[in-house]
């Protein structure tokens, strides 16, 4: 199968690496020429624009920061997308936006599938991430071999919008796990304990969560090279709170979490790994 990927950042490049390793032909476009160059070096093909990619490929995978950017890219691809083409969107956003994109493309004979990832870019690269899909089940079944190449576990949630809702639930819990770990490690340090030793004990305690394995040492050692950017999770928390307001869900911890992430972003950590939430606790949130 031939796959075109628009957006070759942390997740897009990890997906392209897995697909190329599995023998897929992968073409790509990104507004950063260096990202496209790296795809070509790895054995992929460069496309001059999103429209050029859509004209060449029947399956287009989007890996973009926000659904509003996805919508703008899809708009630029519309005339090039052929009836029967499939757009797979890995971008986290509001369920209503996903459903609207699905309906708009269906009117042009193009399939749209939301394919939302649970896991960081390093987990995607290692095949240790999971996937939640929403859209027509026939489209999902057609894409299953592609998804099995990249993901450990697959879940079909139903109509477009359902996967977006589940991804927001997942991100709420995962983000709060990171914030709690950051607070706990800083509390340990304030009590005169060695944070690395505290983390070692926490990993075998009833308080264990997997985020200790993926983010704990990063927090202890202040290693924030990005696997998933803090600003991206802040965007998701804002979407979570907006959806909560519209559904009547009580989300007081998420409201506090947004404040912590905003503090870390103001301190310059928006482009850092999301484990940098710990910087909202340390040194008054400054570098």
Image (cartoon, grey):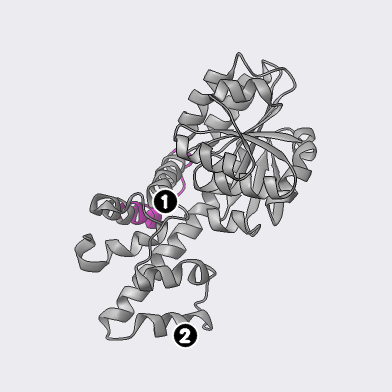
Residue at the far top: name it: 79
Q: Is residue 160 visible?
A: no
Residue 84 is inside the magenta segment: no
Q: Residue at x 34, y 84 (%)?
A: 194
Tell me the element at label 1.
loop
Q: Which residue is mark 1?
A: 229
Question: Residue 49 at x, y = what percent?
Answer: 53, 24
Front tag of 2 and 1: 1
Label 1 packing within 10 angstroms: few (<14), some (14-19), many (20+): many
Q: Which residue is mark 2?
A: 201
CA distance for labels 2 and 1: 27 Å
Q: Quadrant of residue 236?
A: top left
Residue 283 left/right relative to 107: left
Q: Are marks 2 and 1 in contact (CB under 8 Å)?
A: no
Question: Residue 166 at x, y = what percent?
Answer: 59, 47
Q: Residue at x 51, y 79 (%)?
A: 203
The overriding secondary structure of the stretch rendered in magenta is helix
Q: Quadrant of the N terminus?
A: top right
Label 2 packing within 10 angstroms: few (<14), some (14-19), many (20+): few
The range drawn in magenta is 246-259
Q: Quadrant of residue 252?
A: bottom left
Q: Quadrant of the C terminus?
A: bottom left
195 or 227: nearer the viewer: 227
Question: Residue 111 at x, y = what percent?
Answer: 70, 26
Residue 248 is inside the magenta segment: yes
Residue 243 left/right relative to 74: left
69 or 51: nearer the viewer: 51
127 or 104: nearer the viewer: 127
Tell me the element at label 2.
helix
Residue 168 left/right relative to 83: left
Residue 266 left/right relative to 19: left
């Amino acid at each position: 199968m031939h796959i075109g990927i628009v957006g070759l950042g942390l997740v897009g490049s990890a997906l392209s690496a897995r697909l190329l390793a599995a023998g897929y032909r992968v073409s790509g476009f990104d507004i950063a020429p260096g990202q496209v160059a790296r795809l070509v070096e790895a054995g992929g093909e460069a496309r001059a624009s999103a429209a050029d990619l859509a004209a060449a490929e029947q399956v287009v995978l989007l890996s973009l920061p926000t659904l509003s950017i996805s919508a703008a890219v899809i708009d630029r691809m519309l005339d090039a997308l052929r009836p029967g083409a499939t757009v797979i969107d890995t971008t986290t956003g509001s369920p209503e936006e996903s459903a609207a994109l699905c309906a708009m493309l269906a009117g042009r004979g193009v399939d749209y599938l939301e394919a939302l990832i649970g896991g960081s870019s390093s987990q995607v690269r290692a095949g240790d991430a999971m996937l939640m899909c929403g859209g027509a089940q026939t489209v999902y079944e057609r894409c299953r071999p592609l998804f099995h190449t990249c993901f450990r576990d697959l879940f079909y949630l139903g109509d477009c919008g359902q996967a977006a809702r589940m991804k927001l639930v997942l991100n709420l819990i995962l983000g709060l796990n990171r914030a709690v770990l950051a607070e706990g490690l800083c509390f340990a340090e304030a009590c005169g304990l060695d944070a690395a030793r505290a983390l070692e004990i926490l990993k075998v305690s009833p308080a264990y969560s997997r985020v200790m394995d993926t983010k704990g040492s990063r927090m202890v050692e202040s290693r924030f090279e990005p696997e998933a950017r803090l600003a991206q999770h802040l965007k998701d928390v804002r979407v979570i709170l907006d959806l909560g307001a519209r559904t009547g869900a009580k989300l007081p911890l998420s409201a506090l979490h947004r404040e912590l992430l905003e503090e870390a972003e103001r301190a310059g950590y928006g482009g850092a790994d999301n484990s940098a939430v710990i910087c909202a606790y340390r040194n008054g949130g400054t570098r």
